[in-house]
Image (cartoon, coloured by chain):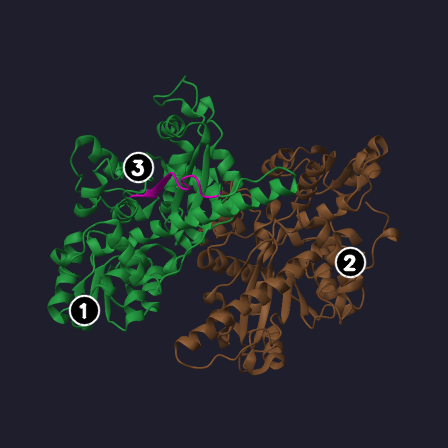
Chain colours: A brown, B green
Amino acid sequence: MADISKCPPLSRSSVQAAHNLIRSNIHLTPVLTCQTLTDIASTPQSPEALKGTEYEGKEPARPKINLFFKCENLQKIGAFKARGAFHALARLTDEELERGVVTHSSGNHAQALALAARTRGVKAHIVMPTISTPSKIAGTKSYGADVIFSGSTSTEREAVVADVIARTGAILVPPYDHPDIILGQGTMALELETQVEDLIARNSELGARQRIVNGAKARNGDVRHKQALHAVIAPCGGGGMLSGIAIALEGTGITVFGAEPEFEGADDAVRGLAAGKRVESVKTLTIADGLRTPVGEIPWTIISDKKKVRGVYSVSEEQIKAAMKLVMERMKVFVEPSAVVGLAVVLYDEGFRRLVEEESGEEGWNIGVIFSGGNTTLEAIAKLFEAPEEKKERAEGILGKDGERVAENVAG
Amino acid sequence: MADISKCPPLSRSSVQAAHNLIRSNIHLTPVLTCQTLTDIASTPQSPEALKGTEYEGKEPARPKINLFFKCENLQKIGAFKARGAFHALARLTDEELERGVVTHSSGNHAQALALAARTRGVKAHIVMPTISTPSKIAGTKSYGADVIFSGSTSTEREAVVADVIARTGAILVPPYDHPDIILGQGTMALELETQVEDLIARNSELGARQRIVNGAKARNGDVRHKQALHAVIAPCGGGGMLSGIAIALEGTGITVFGAEPEFEGADDAVRGLAAGKRVESVKTLTIADGLRTPVGEIPWTIISDKKKVRGVYSVSEEQIKAAMKLVMERMKVFVEPSAVVGLAVVLYDEGFRRLVEEESGEEGWNIGVIFSGGNTTLEAIAKLFEAPEEKKERAEGILGKDGERVAENVAG
């Protein structure tokens, strides 16, 4: 990885420079809208939904929200991680590239680095735990990477990485805790900003033309007179993407929010912000498996700055599932659980909804929601949405973790 | 429904007229491409995949295929049925509209008619079996329709429909066996034809510009010199969509194919074509639940005409599931099982693949694949893709049909 001391500053113009470097390697992913979801977001929650929260018994918020979905699930390798990986490689010298790159990851970063390396004709060594699912190992190998197995503790993985570096001189490309990765991920925000402007301008033009057709006068030049995008909400795991977006949008007047799962302490950013100190380790099995890591040191310097990230909100596993169900069944877009935590906050976090109502006024807010990836399987979805009877049995230990019946419990 | 004797002829120009009538009511659904799926389609099947078929031991076909997906899952109400329903209503007189409309359906046609009726300010009576899933009943009611329950046999349903007509004078809008419905569904083919032309022209322009950049000469006017779309393959249930597409594309040189599930005799078109006689009744529980009906009388007159529909192919339940898995996991697009039977034929039917190889030559074929709808639920997907252990138990009767454990079998 490029030496941190030689990295460009974490600024909007550095993100713009990163975008120029990687533009030809990545997809300009579409920004989609969905009237059904926009309507649901703009409908007050039921009083029942607020039971057990600090808002119980209070009038549910009535925010006006227009949703714009940045579909990074349609990015190369099926997730935004391609941006950071391509940027990290673009910032290495030819000499450095010749040494190859290495990382440890069993997720989207592994495939992103493998793809970026293959594109540049560079050797990639990916250290994966032996217990990784065969499909992920196959996926990473399919991009031509050299997959090396390790134990699943961080000590074991790091030992194998150190060994690869000692053996090959390969350069470590970490998944999020590096300026080049952060700047790369931030590029999606530049695209989103312009795409929402274009969508709104096109709709206004259509509206203006319609008014002419209807006999009313269209005012010239009224098409881009207002700020298009008011806020962006993005998932937060290691924080590379969220901090990148915050940097990309600094000075634009667009407010940036983060979203996390809360299950088993996965809400480390929320807790860290409350305590005024980064949470350094997290052990959670949230279904949002891309967000199980704590925020990295460099991302934390951005995320803990209120002027850059206005706030981070957390949602429950059931809220993530409900958002996933809406996105797939209503919008017909295939997403992984981690991708929908931002939408879940918009729909179900009453604190967030109150803030939007208070700050946006009559006009409402145009909110950009980042769908970070779509790398899940139908079998994984089957486990999440299996019939309640089966789930109950799993909880009671009649079915084992992998759906296998636990024989000794059955007879009872 | 408009009197059949007064309907426009089943011709391309009638489909164009239908398109003009409904254009403002429907979505111009996108045509998407996916390099991964195009690559898979252009890769020979493995010799193992041909075992047990008439092609066992033969060299697998090597067709060159470019896929273009017409995403009617992104149509209003989540399926192409909106086209036929809006067209059926557009063809009624104001007097007729005042009487309201009626149909029996528990599927996409019910919601399509309900939406079209609401849009026109017309009363819709939808007869649904009492055993319909609550979500479908709620969906239909949410469009403002009057839902009336009946028994689940066709005699029971028809009696209730007859009663509604006697009581209200409402006009019956059948799901597929009527010229207005057929012409309405055919409109998607006109869009697909133009969209593929545009996509290919844009790519050629890009290519031409790239060649200039690279120092080579671009030939002027070489952008639209070839036929863009060579073939279309569409699912076939009642046959309204397939026959409509065939009519829309008559005389264009574009070859039209149909696709069916084969499970429990759902391949009634294939069997009817072989026997030279329409199969009049089908009783199947194929997972492609939109395709459980036999081809209707009027669609049959088109589908059985080799000059209009070149052939119909059928696929297994496992092939439908495999295609569904590819579309969701690789393309990130949410589809119902019925939507992918055309893709399953392209990928897995060796007879179809040989035909493409023989007829398309070195250039290959650009094939339009209709994704007919996306109305399924994550719970339904969970049942289709549950872990093999659970499926085995279901087959052995340890789990009941709805996932409930059959208590008496457990102790053994």
The residue mark sitting in front, 3 or 2, is 2
**Residue that mark 3 sits on:** B263
Residue B224 among magenta residues:
yes
Q: How far apart, in angstroms, are the residues tagged by discs 3 and 1? A: 42 Å
Q: Which mark is residue A14?
A: 2
Q: Chain of mark 2?
A: A
The magenta stretch is: B223-236
**Number of numbered discs overlaid on the protein picture:** 3
Q: How far apart, in angstroms, are the residues tagged by discs 1 and 2? A: 63 Å
Q: Does residue B2 sit above or below B191 in this rendering? A: below
Q: Are marks 3 and 1 in contact (CB under 8 Å)?
A: no
Q: Residue at x 40, y 50 (%)?
A: B194
The residue mark sitting in front, 3 or 1, is 1
Q: How far apart, in angstroms, are the residues tagged by discs 3 and 2? A: 58 Å
Q: Which structural element holds mark 2?
A: helix
Give how far across and how far down residue A283 sits, in percent. Answer: 71, 53
In this rendering, does residue A384 appear at all? yes
Q: Residue at x 75, y 64 (%)?
A: A303
- Amino acid at pointer 2: Ser
User: How many C-alpha atoms fall within 10 Å of the one at disc 1: few (<14), some, or many (≥20)?
Assistant: few
